[in-house]
Image (cartoon, grey):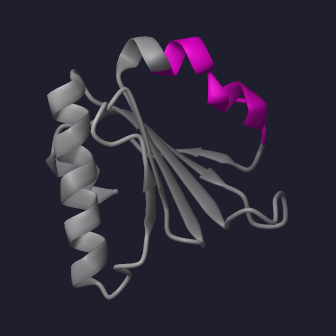
Amino acid sequence: MARLDDDKAQDIVLIDLKGKSPVADSMIIASGRSHRHVGALADHILRALKDAGCGRARVEGLPHCDWVLIDTGDLIIHLFRPEVRSFYNIEKIWAVDSPHRVSAN
């Protein structure tokens, strides 16, 4: 999450999924200002994951960069342009006021 913060991602949210879903342990949702910003965020995260030895992350949404999904197995990262994020509103699925949702900021 520090990488996203350093790269000026907006509205970063961490959702703890432990015991809530078998899909992953955690989910991060963040926005970039433009297609190019979302692409740069994804590229930097993928490089950091590779450097940390997690180079087998699955990626969807490149090169369009409206919504990029990075799945490492234990962690799922969603990177959106703001309009696309508000349209899909995937945070609502995890109930904004649920106790397992933690703000990253």
For this rendering, which residue is in front, 94 or 40? 40
Residue at image point 72% right, 58% down: 17
The C terminus appears in which quarter of the rendering? top left
Residue at image point 46% right, 17% down: 84
Residue 102, position as x, y percentages in the image: 59, 47
Residue at image point 27% right, 78% down: 50
User: In screen coordinates, is 64 left or right of 103?
Assistant: left
Residue at image point 40% right, 37% down: 30
Residue 87 magenta: yes
Residue 99, position as x, y percentages in the image: 77, 45
Residue 35, position as x, y percentages in the image: 23, 26
> Relative to 101, does residue 21 appear above or below in the rendering?
below
User: In screen coordinates, is 19 left or right of 39?
Assistant: right
User: In screen coordinates, is 46 left or right of 71?
Assistant: left
Magenta-tinted stretch: 85-98
Q: Quadrant of residue 25?
A: bottom right
Q: Quadrant of residue 101?
A: top right
For this rendering, which residue is in front, 35 or 62? 62
User: In screen coordinates, is 47 left or right of 22?
Assistant: left
Residue at far bottom of view? 53
Any part of residue 21 in sight: yes
Numbered circles on residues, count: 0
> Relative to 105, does residue 20 appear above or below in the rendering?
below
> Relative to 16, does residue 57 appear above or below in the rendering?
below
Residue 90 magenta: yes
Residue 14, position as x, y percentages in the image: 53, 49
